[in-house]
Structure formats: structure tokens, C-alpha cells
Amino acid sequence: MKSFCPKVSFLLLITLVLTSFVFSEAQKCRPNGRIRGKKAPSGQCNKENDSDCCVQGKMYTTYECSPSVSTHTKAYLTLNSFQKGGDGGGPSACDNQYHSDDTPVVALSTGWFNDKSRCLNKITISANGKSVVATVVDECDSTMGCDEEHDYQPPCPNNIVDASKAVWKALGVPQDQWGGLDITWSDA
């Protein structure tokens, strides 16, 4: 039997490397648009938990995707109230209910929420040398914002796990440091 010609082997190797690169590039999450901020009518943007309100005329990036999920997905933990009247706005998208701040629940960025496919599923959040299991109850919308439906808050970045106070407590984060924290998470 004849062995492969070195040129053919080299071409095969180049083809595999290029295919891998193109596939890898296709898996990256890139912005899909921008929206212009609108100023909220008086009293319409709930600033509980240091929530941001849209700035008139500022451009905000939107995403339809989130980074790939792994056993240690890197994310940014934010603080949200899922209670009635809280900065989370209306009832949760998964069950049309409000949830106590004492219950470990989260909203995920649009790509990770994945058209409700993670609704009421559990995820494990790790940070600060501790882990907590929380239930996915809502979407942190990365595609829209700066309107009444979104409490005049900007679109979420594509890597957000927006968590109740119970999650922050379980992770042992001092209350004066609540608001933003690098974490990892995975499906439980």
C-alpha cells in the first residue's frame, strides 16, 4: 500500500485547521444591534438594587445570544428583586408569578434563557468559594430595553445571571458588596 503524499497530508491538515477556526468563530456571540435610550417618565424607572435607568440618546448594544454554556460558564452576577413592586418589573416570564427575595431565583440573559428552555430548571452558581442552586424564573432581556415593559432599564449584557438576595446571601457576599460579581454557573 502507498502512504499519503506529504502534500495531501498537509492540505488535509490545513483544511481541518481552517474548518475548526471557522466553526469556532461561528460559535462566538456577537452584538446584533443597538437601541437608543429614552428617558423614563417621572417615577417610571425603579432604581432599587442600584438598577440603571436608560439615558436619553445613549446607544445600548443588544444581543440575541450568550456565550456557550459549559460546566463552568463565566458570567456576571447582578442583584434583582423578583417581588411585586421590585426592580424586576412584572411577574416572572416562566410562571407569571412574583418570587420572594428570600427564595434563590434568577433571570438569565436572553441567549442562556433560550426561549424559555431553561424555565423552572435549576442552575448551580459558584463564587466566593461557595455554591448555591437557584431556579430560573425569568429572562434578563438582552434584545430590548429602555421602554415601559423593561422599566426603562437598558438591555442586559449577554452574560448576566440576575439573582435574588437569597443567592447573594448563600454565596456569603457581604451585603455592602452586593450588585456585581464575577461567577461561574452550570445547569444543575
Image (cartoon, rainbow, N blue to C red):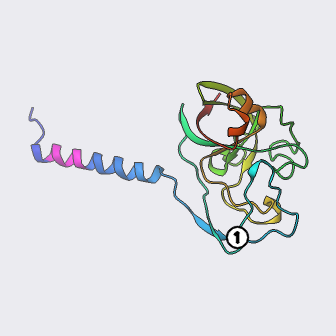
Q: Is residue 134 left or right of residue 91?
A: left
Left or right: residue 92 compared with residue 172: right
Residue 36 figure quarter: bottom right
How far across and how far down the image is residue 181, in percent?
Answer: 62, 40
- Quarter of the figure with residue 63: bottom right
**Amino acid under disc 1:** Gly
- Magenta span: predominant SS is helix
- Pick whichever, 133 or 1, lies toward us: 133
Q: Is residue 56 left or right of residue 181?
A: right
| SS at badge 1 | loop
| Rendered-image quadrant of the N terminus | top left
Q: Residue at x 63, y 45 (%)?
A: 112
Asked whether 146 or 119 is in front, the reply is 146
Q: Residue furthest front?
A: 176
Question: Closer to the camera, 13 or 32?
Answer: 32
Residue furthest to the right: 84
Q: Which residue is mark 1?
A: 37
Q: How many marks?
A: 1
Give me the residue at 10% from left, 35% from top.
Answer: 3
Residue 92 vertical position relative to residue 39 in the rendered view, above or below:
above
Residue at 83% in and 64% down:
148
Residue 175 or residue 97, whichever sits in front: 175
Q: Quadrant of the C terminus?
A: top right
Q: In the image, is 114 to the left or to the right of 46? A: left
Which residue range is magenta in the image? Answer: 8-14
